[in-house]
Amino acid sequence: MRKIALMSVLVVCIGSAQALALSQMPYLSASDADFANLLPPPPADGSTLDRRDLQGVLDLQKTVTPARMEKIQADVEQTVYRVAGEVLGPTFTKERFPLAGEFFTKVNQASAAGVRDIKQKYKKQRPFQASKEVKVPENIERASQGPTYPSGHSTFGAQVALLLSMMVPEKTNELHSRGREYGEQRVASGVAYLSALMIALMMQKPEFREDFQAVKTEVRKGLGFAP
C-alpha cells in the first residue's frame, strides 16, 4: 500500500515537472522574417540626425551622477529579474520564479539572432567609437566592441516590459517606464543611441503562446494576483 502511495506521489511530481517545462522549440528561426531588413537604416554617419543622436548621448552623460552610474553598472545584467525586479518587488527572484527566467532567456536568445543580423547589415559605430567626447566605463567598453544598431539591451528591456505588462496589466505603466529606463542606461553609458520588436513574430508560434501562458500563471500566482 505504501509503495502504491509513493508511486502515486512520483507520478504527480513528474507530471508537475513536465507541466513546468518550456517547449524545446525555438521561438524564432531564420526563415520567420528577413531580419536584416526588419528595421530602417540608422541615421547616416555625419548627417544632421546622426549629430543630433550623438549630442543626445553627450547631453545625457552630463546628468549622470555616481548613483546613476551604479545603476548603469547594475543594468548591464540582462535578466528579467534585473529589469522587472524594481517593479515586481524583491521576491521576484530566480528561486521563486524559475520559469520566468528560462522563458525570458529564450526570448532574448531568439531576438538576439535578428538583432545580430541588423547590426551586421548596418555596422553602426557606437557613440564612444564615433567621438572621443563620449566617456564609457572600461568594463562596459570592453563588452561593447560590436555595432550598436539596434541596441540588444534596449530590445530586451522593451520585450520584458511588453510581455510582463501582458501578464500583469496591473503594473503596465511601471513596467513600461522601467523598460524605457533600462534601455536609456545604455545611452547614458555611451554605448548606444536613442534611435532604435520581434514579439509579434514569436506570438505566431503555438509553443511560444503555451509557454507564455505557463509563465503568466507562475508570475500572477507568485505575486498574489488573481488568475
Image: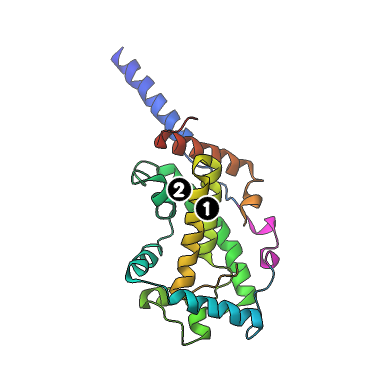
The verdict on residue 181 being magenta is no
Between label 1 and label 2, give the one nearer the viewer. 1
Res. 184 in view:
yes
Instruction: Tell me the SS state at disc 2.
Output: helix
Q: Residue at x 41, y 33 (%)?
A: 224
Residue under label 2, please give it: 102
Q: Report the amino acid beneath label 2.
A: Glu
Q: Is residue 22 left or right of residue 91?
A: right
Tell me which residue sits at (44%, 55%) in the image. 83
User: Which quadrant holds the N terminus?
Assistant: top left
Residue count near mark 1 (Cα–Cα under 10 Å), binned few <14, some 14–19, many ≥20: many
User: Sequence-wise, which precedes: disc 1 or disc 2?
Assistant: 2
Viewer-proximal residue among 96 and 71: 71
Residue type highlighted by circle 1 = His
**Left or right: where 223 falls relative to 29:** left
Question: What distance separates the C-alpha of mark 1 from that of mark 2?
Answer: 21 Å
Q: Which is nearer the eye, 149 or 176?
A: 176
Residue 85 percent across, percent down from the top left: 39, 50
Number of residues whose C-alpha sits closer than 10 Å to that of mark 2, classed few (under 14), some (14–19) or many (20 or more): some
The answer to whether residue 157 is above or below residue 21 is below
**Is 32 within the magenta?**
yes
**Marking on residue 176:** 1
Q: Which residues are magenta?
A: 28-39
Image quadrant in which you'd find residue 141: bottom left
Residue 175 position within the rendered picture, expressed as x and y whole percent measured from the top left: 49, 50
Residue 26: percent from left, percent from top = 57, 50
Can residue 146 be seen from the camera position used here?
no
Left or right of 110: which side holds 86? left
